[in-house]
Image (spheres, rainbow, N blue to C red):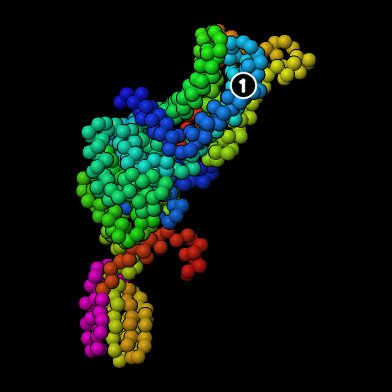
Amino acid sequence: MNPWRNIWTITKRELGAYFTSPLAYVFIVIFLLLCGFFTFFVGGFFERQEASLVRPFFDWHPWFYLFLVPAVGMRLWAEERRVGTLELLLTMPITAWQAIVGKFLASWLFLALALVLTFPVVLTVNYLGHPDNGVILTAYVGSWLMAGAYLAISCVTSALTRSQVVSFIISLVVCLFLILAGFPPVINVLEQFARPWLVDMVTSFSVMTHFEGFQKGVLDSRDILFFLSVIGFSLFTTSVILRTHRAG
Amino acid sequence: MIKVQNLAKAFGTKRAVDDVSFSVDRGEVLGFLGPNGAGKSTTMRMITGFLSPSGGSVTVGGFDLAEHPIQARRLIGYLPENAPAYTDMTVHGFLNFAAEIRGLRGDARKKAVNRVVEMCFLESVLHQSVETLSKGYRHRTCFAQSIIHDPDVLVLDEPTDGLDPNQKHEVRQLIRRMGEKKAIIFSTHILEEVDAACSRAIIIDRGKIVANGTPQELRQKSEWAGAVTLRVKGVASSAVTTKLYQVPLVKRVTVVDEKDGHVTVRAFPKAGANGALAQAIGEAAHEWHIEQLQAEEGRLDEVFRSITMPDTVKEAAK
């Protein structure tokens, strides 16, 4: 049978699960509130007097995602293992890969929806001035890819444990590392004693470094590749973890 | 339909399943018996492909589970232990999902869902969330999921666990009916279910098969098989036992009860008595006032206990 049909069946079920629980609504409301508050108050959108969303809006995304994406991803596998439905899912006539991709896609689409719902910010800036909408679009794409990378990491930690809380905390720590590796204050400290090639290597692992390009409106294949490879590697790790569960 | 060969599973140093081989054909209902932790669920999880075996192989409908897992799983319907179901879905949504992932679309899916809803009496909770269901309904929902694609092979892990007596009866009937056309394995530790639904039973203990046969054959292994219970009036128990020990087929006589001049004794046959004991005893006792003379059938629970009791308990019992 067509593998995408199976994947889509799983994706539909997962998306449905988000919207039958309060999680989806709580998540979207908090995300939008945070975006609004940080953009207009903390980010100083009006004081800047410029028609751009880069600094006041997108700069915060890596930090929002740090808390919010692990909250979306933590239930993916941990809940299945706790309730025992994992046994149902993995004995259905589908491959583990189809289940992994299907679940990941559902959460990723859900994050896309949350991101799309920030459109009033875009309307506001267009009403007030003449921003470069191309830049805004690439920044959105970058933001979504970054969310996908965080999400894939949450998939791994969720597959590791039955406890959603443990999954949340571990993925938060891992994602924090991915941010801090490219966070200017941390780089400054690192530059004091490390050789430049080492600093470059550390920063090249950071989501900040790779998100930067998108924020400037540049679609660099290396940045896209970075996020996609984090996603690919994490989903592969998830499949390895699931396989070790089955091996007992 | 199902062929299990030298199946083994080790968790660390513990061998949960150890060199288990058996096969189930179409039209057979195999009861899987054993004490808790004997390896029943582990074996079933390997047959359905949830766990990968550490040794041996499973073939379902000609497909090796290691080489063609998807084709093999397509033939299987599986009710896991504790009947898990997605708690955030409605019964209807859950069954639709199960049908869809089994490749049923459109009209075929609707028909399949309607069929199992009817079979498992789920109409009244169809649009209720699984989370709010009682245990019996949740169990039936998961059971409905396992038969939604009308599979050739059914693997049911404790299908009657947590059901009330009426529901238990219903499920047993269902299993027996479906067993005419399918190959079914179900595990249980309720022995009466073996009689009610199985054409064959396997007893498994500490990972190994210790008995395999029809319920009738298993019962023959019982000490009770062919034993005779006799109740007489107005005779001393010592006189009765002495007399019965003179019957050549008797191996052992125990006094069950003695009160108000009524004596009940039970005589166990020697090997090879083949049911002739009752007549022999009837003849030996013809001069007494016989109130009851009854040949016992073998008792499964006794067979089960004597086979699966840990060695330490057996020795203590001696």
Nearer-the-camera pick, A157 or A165: A165
Tell me what residue is drawn at x 22 percent, y 82 percent. B283
Q: Position of residue A169 (x, y in %)?
A: 61, 34
The answer to whether residue A140 of the structure is visible from this angle is: no
Quarter holding residue A130: top right
SS for callout 1: helix
Disc tally is: 1
- Identify the amino acid type marked 1: Phe
- In this rendering, the answer to whether B209 lies above or below A18 is below
In this view, the residue farthest toward the front is A128
Nearer-the-camera pick, A142 or A149: A142
- Mark 1 lies on residue: A40
Nearer-the-camera pick, B195 or A134: A134
Nearer-the-camera pick, B246 or B131: B131
- In this rendering, the answer to whether B76 lies above or below B164 is above
Quarter holding residue B282: bottom left
The answer to whether residue B305 of the structure is visible from this angle is: yes
Tell me what residue is drawn at x 59 percent, y 38 percent. A166
Q: Position of residue B180 (x, y in %)?
A: 21, 48
Q: Position of residue B172 (x, y in %)?
A: 28, 55
- Which region shows up in magenta? B269-294
User: Label 1: few (<14), some or many (≥20) within 10 Å?
Assistant: some
- Chain of the residue on which disc 1 is drawn: A
Left or right, B116 with respect to B65, comes to left
Left or right, A83 with respect to A197, comes to left
